[in-house]
Amino acid sequence: MLNTLQRKSVVALSVLFALGALGGCATHQTPTNSKAATPAAKTESAPAAAKAEAPARKQTYFMVYHENGRIYAMTEPQIYLGLMEHDEVPLTRARVGGGPEGETVVFGITSKDGDHLDKPTAAEDIYDGRTKDVGAFYGEVVRNGRYHVFGEWKDFQDYLDHKEITFTYTEIGTGPKGETVIYALNNKTKDSGHPAALIEQFNRLHKAK
């Protein structure tokens, strides 16, 4: 039969054993695998990756040599399409005698432009040659009942300077109302022939089927 001193020793040993066991369990459950931090890392990097993939805005420019003797110039596709469909532009700023042969030039302006009419609009900067480089570009010139389509800024500038395109790909009757569409090519693209990407842009803008 255990005396009082022996019973106290047994209890003390039991308590120490229990504490040691709990300490071992806690150590075993602590995550040591570095992969546990992976989800947090992915979550933080996702917004940065999405931002990096955001496409740059393409500069657009449209000119219409109208049968009324005026030249219309604008940067916004919707203003241009409204002119072609309804023969009118809601907001304009005109330059009498500003054309190469004394024509009146009418610049289509946006509501945003209207807040800063003390400064030239983007359409005027391009027309006057102050814009030197725009990066990604798409433009159209409607003249003599034909569409001239440009996918590169330099090709567009060359046409404005010389009123002709050295290399072209022409489609007869494929315009919105059956007009001829002339696609501008250059030394880099002329050997490819059919400019599929440029044709797709034209059709998408005019919703051709």
Image (spheres, rainbow, N blue to C red):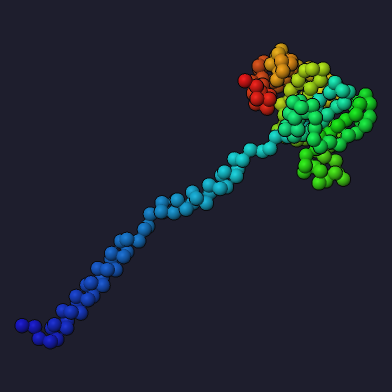
Q: Position of residue 33 (x, y in %)?
A: 38, 54
Seen from the viewer's position, the closer of residues 75 and 178 is: 178
Above or below, 170 against 139 in this view is: above
Lateral position of residue 200 relative to residue 73, left or right: left
Above or below, 179 against 21 in this view is: above
Seen from the viewer's position, the closer of residues 25 and 112 is: 112
Quarter assignment of residue 137? top right
Lateral position of residue 77 relative to residue 97, left or right: left
Lateral position of residue 67 relative to residue 197, left or right: right
Seen from the viewer's position, the closer of residues 184 and 1 is: 184
Residue occupying the point 12% across, 87% down? 4
Above or below, 148 against 117 in this view is: above
Q: Position of residue 207 (x, y in %)?
A: 65, 25
Residue occupying the point 81% across, 25% down? 64
Quadrant of the rendering where the C terminus is positioned: top right
Seen from the viewer's position, the closer of residues 158 and 3 is: 158
Q: Position of residue 35 (x, y in %)?
A: 41, 51
The answer to whether residue 129 is seen in the rendering is no
The answer to whether residue 21 is seen in the rendering is yes
